[in-house]
Amino acid sequence: MQKLFIGNIPHGSSEMELQQWVESQGFEVESAQIIRDRSTGMSRGFGFVVLNEEWNVKEAISALNGQRMGGRVLTVNVAVPQSPRSDGLNFGQRNSRPRRNYGGPNTD
C-alpha cells in the first residue's frame, strides 16, 4: 500500500474530487479520504490517498507536490502513522493514575 498525505486541499472538495484529480495526473487510486472536523463536518484541508501498488511513491510525490487543485497549491508527502498525542488526550486509553477523592459525595 502506497499512502500519500495531501495538504492544502480546497475546503469544498470531496473525496471523489480528490481521487479524480490524482487520477487525472496519471496515477491509479485505490482510495481517497479527506479529514473532517468531528463537530462541524467541515474539511480540515488535508487528506490521504492510497495509490495502487504499482506506483512509486517518490515518483508520485515528485509529480503531484506543488500542483494546483481548485486554485490551491497542494503539499504531497509520504503519509506517516500518527504518533500518540503528548497532551494526554489519547482517546480510548485509560489514565493509569488512581482517581483522587476530593471530599465530594461518595458515588461508589
Image: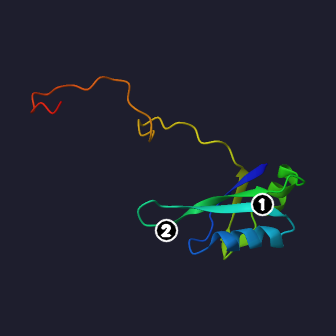
Asked which quadrant contains residue 62, the reply is: bottom right
Which tag is nearer the camera, tag 2 or tag 1?
1
In 3D space, how far apart are the residues under numbered discs 2 and 1 (Cα atoms)? Answer: 23 Å
Q: Residue 8: which quarter of the image?
A: bottom right
Q: Earlier in the sequence, mark 2 or mark 1?
A: 1
Q: Can you identify the residue that label 2 sits on?
A: 42
Q: Is residue 37 left or right of residue 107?
A: right
Q: Is residue 54 above or below residue 89?
A: below
Rendered position, 94 above or below 16: above
| Amino acid at pointer 1 | Glu
Q: Which residue position is annotated with label 1?
A: 30
| Quadrant of residue 22 within the rendered picture | bottom right
> x, y (%) of residue 101?
17, 26
Residue shown at 69% from the left, 72% from the top: 16
Mark 2 residue type: Met
Dot 1: what SS? strand
Instruction: Using a 10 Å C-alpha cutoff, classify the residue at mark 1 as few (fewer than 14 neighbours), some (14 to 19) or many (20 or more).
Output: some
Q: Alpha-carbon neighbours of circle 2 within 10 Å: few (<14), some, or many (≥20)?
A: few
**Which residue lies at the image location 72% right of the left edge and 71% below the top edge?**
68
Task: Report the front residue among 102 and 88.
Answer: 102
Give the quadrant of the C terminus.
top left
Return the x and y of residue 104 as percentages of the image width and height: 10, 32
Residue at the farthest front position: 108
